[in-house]
Amino acid sequence: MRALFIFTLLSFTALEGWAQRASPIRFDFWYGPEQSFGQPGLTQRYVNVLGNVRAPAGVASLTYALNGGAARPLTLGKDGFRLAETGDFNAELDGRELRNGPNRVVFTATDSARHQSSE
C-alpha cells in the first residue's frame, strides 16, 4: 500500500493587542515549507522535519503540534548527533500518527523577551 504524507507549514505572525506586528523570530525549514514523505511508501518509522529557529533575544522554547494535537517540546541546538548549530531542531514524527494525505505541523517558538511566533 502506498502512503503519501504531505506537510504544509503555514506561516503567520503573532498578534499583539489590536495591531499586527512582525515577530523577531525567524524559522528556516531546511527542505522547504511543504514537504512530501511516503512515496512510494513509508520506509522508516519516523519522519524528520529539520530546520533552524532564531531570534535576536535568543529562543527560549520551541514546540510542535501535529494535526491540531497537543504541543510537544523540541530540543534546540547542538546535540552531537544531527544538529550542529544554535537553534537547529529535528521534529521526529511517528509515522503511525500521520494521516494519509495532507498533515499539518505547527511550530511555536518563544524568545527570551516572551515574543511568540508560529509557523
Image: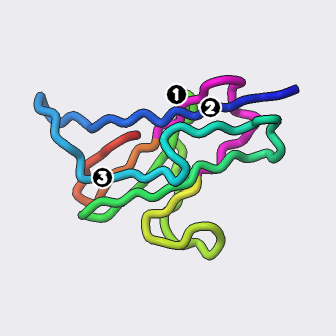
Q: CA distance from mark 1 to mark 3?
A: 22 Å
Q: Residues within 10 Å of mark 2 (few under 14, many from 20)?
A: some
Q: Could you say where residue 25 lies in the image, as x and y percent from the top left? A: 30, 52
- Of 50 and 67, the residue lying toward us: 50
With 18 as the anchor, is 67 left or right in this view? Answer: right
Q: Amino acid at mark 2?
A: Ile
- At label 1, the amino acid type is Gly
Q: Which residues are magenta?
A: 91-106
Q: Which residue is mark 3?
A: 25
Q: Which residue is mark 1?
A: 68
- State which tag comes first along the sequence, 3 or 2: 2
Q: Where is residue 59 shown, x and y percent of the image?
A: 35, 60
Residue hosting label 2: 6
Q: From the viewer's side, name the closer residue of 57 and 29.
A: 29
Residue 71 appears at what percent x and percent y? 50, 40
Identity of the residue drawn at 25% across and 64% down = 57
Q: Earlier in the sequence, mark 1 or mark 3?
A: 3
> What is the secondary structure assignment of the residue under circle 1?
loop
For marks 2 and 1 on the same chain, the one whose residue lies earlier in the sequence? 2
- Viewer-proximal residue among 117 and 60: 117
> Residue 48: x, y in percent?
65, 50
For residue 102, which quarter of the picture? top right
- Residue at 78% x, 28% y: name it: 3
